[in-house]
Amino acid sequence: MGQDSPYMRRALRLARRAMGTTSPNPTVGAVLVKDGEIVGEGHTRPYGQEHAEVVALRQAGERAKDSILYVTLEPCSHHGRTPPCTDAIIDAGVREVRFATLDRNPLVAGSGRRALEGAGITVTAGDEEESAVRMNEAFSKWATTGLPYVTAKFAASLDGKIATRTGDSRWITNEAARRRTHRLRAISDVVMVGVGTVLVDNPQLTARNRQDRPLRRQPLRIVVDSHGRTPTDARLFQEQGPVLVAGAHVPQVRKEALERAGADVMELPAVDGSVDIKALLALLGQREVTSVLVEGGSALLGSLFDQRLVDKVVAFIAPVIIGGTTATTAVGGEGVDTITQALPLCDVRTTKLGTDLMVEGYTDFI
């Protein structure tokens, strides 16, 4: 299977180009090879348009006959907004299909493989599987549970502070770490913060390029704001892209003011006087949101961890000491009573970004 890797790695690179543009569909890359030559390739187009396999087949044309298809995800076999990819593969006369990982969507989940094998096509799976699974971890959770994948992101000092005792937080981490944050926003359906973050930091929450210009595609920005305290002149409303204020006790006058500023105000149930985060995530899942990047603040992150709603953690750690008993820590909430109850992260990876460190890990809440 090792000889397959160059073509599958090419398919993965193609898929990465489409990350953040295909939701609620998965991100997929495909490469068609005939007689050792790539005759067609492509990645999934925005939702409702062609899947990667169809793009590659169209590019290959007649050369697709008797070719080998390398694709990062099991081809779909059901009718959605587009016809089944398995039908197109069979009709094109592809000889063999090699996919990286099974599609966990219950509508597929092995049926694509069975359809291809039923048509006499040789099918193998597993090459570059780990990379392919990671690429579509948000889609897989949403497809199997109906809930979006939640990534908790924060930037902290070495002693775990996200701001000084006066509230100053710009900038704890370096430019390389901030660029990585913009990449995370660009591939997420939603960027979420609590109202406290808006009141203190007045963030834009947009995805921007190296020249600090907003990208064409922006995530939905959500402010969890029980009482509608978000200022109508906040920088959120001065940037392109939609804004949603999720409240529980928003006075009518505040709702109307926020709507005039450009927000969609959503009323949700309350739990202990605050927005019911579980209800919010369930509603987002129903709206086909597959991924949520939560950037704080401390109270919102604490609530998510207390309720075991976080799937992944991305922490940027700067080698500075802030100190101060009243300085804000990254994760608030109730926390745990004993060290043995502390949340261990799984499959932890670290990346050095200049002098800063990015730590990524997964919870075992699912």
Image (cartoon, helix red, strand yellow):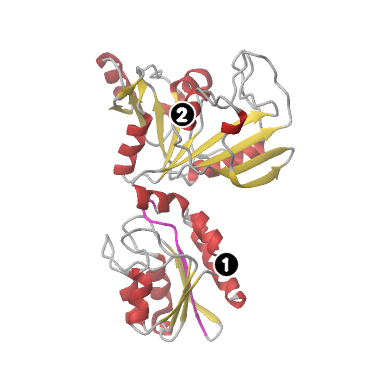
147 or 17: nearer the eye? 147
89 or 47: nearer the eye? 89
For the point 27% across and 14% down, which residue is it?
253
Which amino acid type is marked by label 1?
Answer: Arg
Q: Which residues are magenta?
A: 23-34
Residue 208 x %, y %: 53, 40
For the point 27% across and 19% down, which residue is it?
256
331 is within the stretch colored magenta: no
Quadrant (top left, top right, bottom left, bottom right) of the N terminus: bottom right
Q: Is residue 204 visible?
A: no
* Residues at circles 1 and 2 in contact by the CB criterion of under 8 Å: no
* Quadrant of the rendered image containing residue 82: bottom left
For the point 57% across and 67% down, which residue is it?
9
Q: Say which residue label 2 marks.
A: 193
**Other-residue count near label 2 (Cα within 10 Å), few / some / many at <14 / 14–19 / ≥20:** many
Asked if residue 340 is positioned above or below residue 353 in the image, the reply reads above
Q: Secondary structure at mark 1?
A: helix
Q: Secondary structure at mark 2?
A: strand
Report, in whole angstroms, how far the alpha carbon at label 1 lies from the one at label 2: 35 Å
Q: Say which residue label 1 marks.
A: 9
Residue 279 x %, y %: 32, 33
Q: Earlier in the sequence, mark 1 or mark 2?
A: 1
30 is within the stretch colored magenta: yes
